[in-house]
Image (cartoon, rainbow, N blue to C red):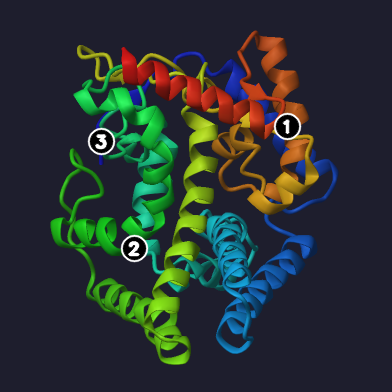
Amino acid sequence: MSKTSFNNCNKAFSAALRSRVNQYFKTNNLSNTGNTRLYIKSIALLAGAIGFYAVLLFLPMPIWGCIFICALLGANLAAIGFNIMHEGGHQSFSKKTWLNTISAYSLNMLGGTIYFWKQKHNISHHTYTNVDGLDHDIDIKFMRTHADQPHRWYHRFQFAYWFVLYGISYIAWVFFQDFEKYFSGKMGIKAERKSMPLREHLIFWATKIGYVGIYLIIPITMVGWLPALLGWLVVGISCGFCLAVVFQLAHVVEGTQFPAIDTTSGKIEQEWMIHQLSTTSNFSTDNRLVSWLLGGLNFQVEHHLFPRISHVHYPAINKLVKETCKEFGVVYLEHRTMGHAFMSHLRHIYRLGIA
């Protein structure tokens, strides 16, 4: 674990915000975890994925229809990640520990490894958001996401090839990045090597074998190898693109900061909550459909400030955060629509590519 810390001398802002959020739950007699609406949505998303999978295997369709359903299945898998796995991984899906665990392991159903994800996401990304060398989510191969990263000759073309990398990100995650972590024992290039419990070794291999069986062997047996492989590619590209874009719109856009560590003190010169606000941006928070599909990850600011609170509470928390930021003069970053955030991201990576 990194010895880097935050300058928490002035905690007036964080103390006020935490007090107001805690009071909100106390006054309204609410649990900070998910509710019936989340559970119904989760069932619908799981049923949708199973339905799309069954249709592709058992219902004859023209090629364009298969491609369309495969793309929908990929987006559905991403939505399961946003709404079920992500909440379970943060222990915010339910008050019941066992239900959070099951929800978190839905990532393994998609071919990923929750054991790795919790270390990389919950610890590295959520603690040291946008800090080079510590937040491994901004270390994207062949992409320059902030000015402190070295500029390579190929970065000048990243505005043209970004969509390829985002599209293959899910497939690369399942078949390359997880194995890279497994055999190196590291969550990132600069991370420390960690041993893996025997139980996690067994789960890792069961996950990968299960993924190949469900997403490749069964479809090849049912519909033939060429349609199965093409369908798998469409599903993977659709899922990967959805996952990558949502992350980028929250952290790699104009206005978000990439703070450096003070070489003398070893500290990041911001209080932790202020750091989260300076490195994270919201988008399209007035769009209920976007919020529903993304599991509230368009309220990324509220999520980073309170990762153990379920996204079903973000609209209410959002008002408290904005009020407190205004009172203390803290900058609150957001884009009105997803389209605006997307264009901001493209401008950001274009400028970093040519600089």
Q: Would residue 283 be seen by someone viewing this image from the given angle?
A: no
**Which residue lies at the image location 52% right of the left edge and 53% below the top edge?**
90
Badge 2 element: helix
The percent position of residue 234, horizontal first and vertical second, equals 48, 63
Disc 2: CA contacts within 10 A as few (<14), some (14-19) or many (>=20): some
Q: Is residue 81 above or below residue 307?
A: below
> According to the image, label 3 marks what residue?
2
Mark 3–mark 1 Cα distance, whole angstroms, equals 30 Å
Left or right: 193 in relation to 138: left
Q: Quadrant of residue 157?
A: top left
Q: Secondary structure at mark 3?
A: loop
Of pointers 3 and 2, the one earlier in the residue sequence? 3
Q: Along the horizontal axis of the image, is 31 left or right of 90?
A: right
Proximity of marks 1 and 2: CB atoms separated by less than 8 Å: no
Say whether residue 179 is left or right of residue 214.
left
Identify the disc placed on residue 318: 1
- The alpha-carbon separation of the residues under discs 3 and 2 comes to 26 Å
Q: Is residue 282 left or right of residue 176?
A: right
